Amino acid sequence: MSANELLKYFFISFALLLSLGLLTQKNATAAAVDPLVFTDAKKEARFKNLIGQLRCLVCQNQSIADSNAELAQDLRKEVYDMIIAGKSDQEVIDYLVARYGNFILYRPPLNAQTFLLWFLPGILVILALFFVIGIIKKRGRQAQKVTLDNKAEDRLNKLIGPKF
């Protein structure tokens, strides 16, 4: 068997193993998503509201309701279990904040730890405005109109010709 044939069989085997791995991973993910069944519509509404307020720690720009990450699935199951156990919304949130920090909340509370998170965008906008105003003033001072006396103006006219 030549080296080219051996290399060809290697790549075909690798491609088959890779595709088989992707298929099993997709099936494992689909099997991991268990439908959560509620007997009470109020509990289901609370569940949907809570998982919409909680940030996926893996995706960071999605709620755990929208994310397909394994951690989001685990968190949905954990929230489900706490609601079924009779915990209040605040108890569920307090538990998750204690475990994962304020970052898990889309709207973290205003306190010493989250002060910059709430006010840094406004502070940056104000600083940018001061910076832009400073540049405009500086350019305005540099662009002051230069006036010529009569002698300099006559010399300039001789060089470039008469005005139109």
Image (cartoon, grey):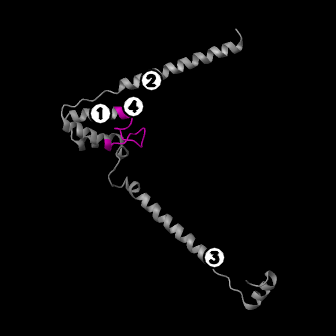
Helix, strand or loop for disc 4: helix
Depth check, mark 4 against mark 2: the one in front is: 2
Helix, strand or loop for disc 3: helix
Q: Tell me which segment is drawn in magenta.
A: 52-73
Q: Quadrant of residue 149?
A: bottom right
Q: Residues within 10 Å of mark 4 (few under 14, many from 20)?
A: some
Name the residue tied to disc 3.
142
Q: Which of the two discs, 3 and 2, labels the residue nearer the N terminus? A: 2
Helix, strand or loop for disc 2: helix
Q: Residues within 10 Å of mark 3 (few under 14, many from 20)?
A: few
Mark 4 → mark 1, Cα distance in angstroms: 12 Å
Q: Is residue 112 left or right of residue 148?
A: left
Mark 3 → mark 2, Cα distance in angstroms: 65 Å
Q: Which of the two discs, 3 and 1, labels the residue nearer the N terminus? A: 1
Name the residue tied to disc 2.
25
Name the residue tied to disc 4.
70
- The reply to whether dot 4 and dot 2 touch (C-beta < 8 Å) is no
Residue 67 lies in the magenta-colored region:
yes
Mark 3 → mark 1, Cα distance in angstroms: 64 Å
Residue depicted at 74% across the width and 91% down the height: 150
- The reply to whether dot 3 and dot 2 touch (C-beta < 8 Å) is no
Between 12 and 43, the residue placed more toward the observer is 12
Q: Residue furthest bottom?
A: 150
- The reply to whether dot 3 and dot 1 touch (C-beta < 8 Å) is no
Report the amino acid beneath label 2: Gln
In the rendered image, residue 104, in percent from the top left (x then y), is placed at: 36, 43
Between 123 and 143, the residue placed more toward the observer is 143
- The reply to whether dot 3 and dot 4 touch (C-beta < 8 Å) is no
Residue depicted at 46% across the width and 21% down the height: 23
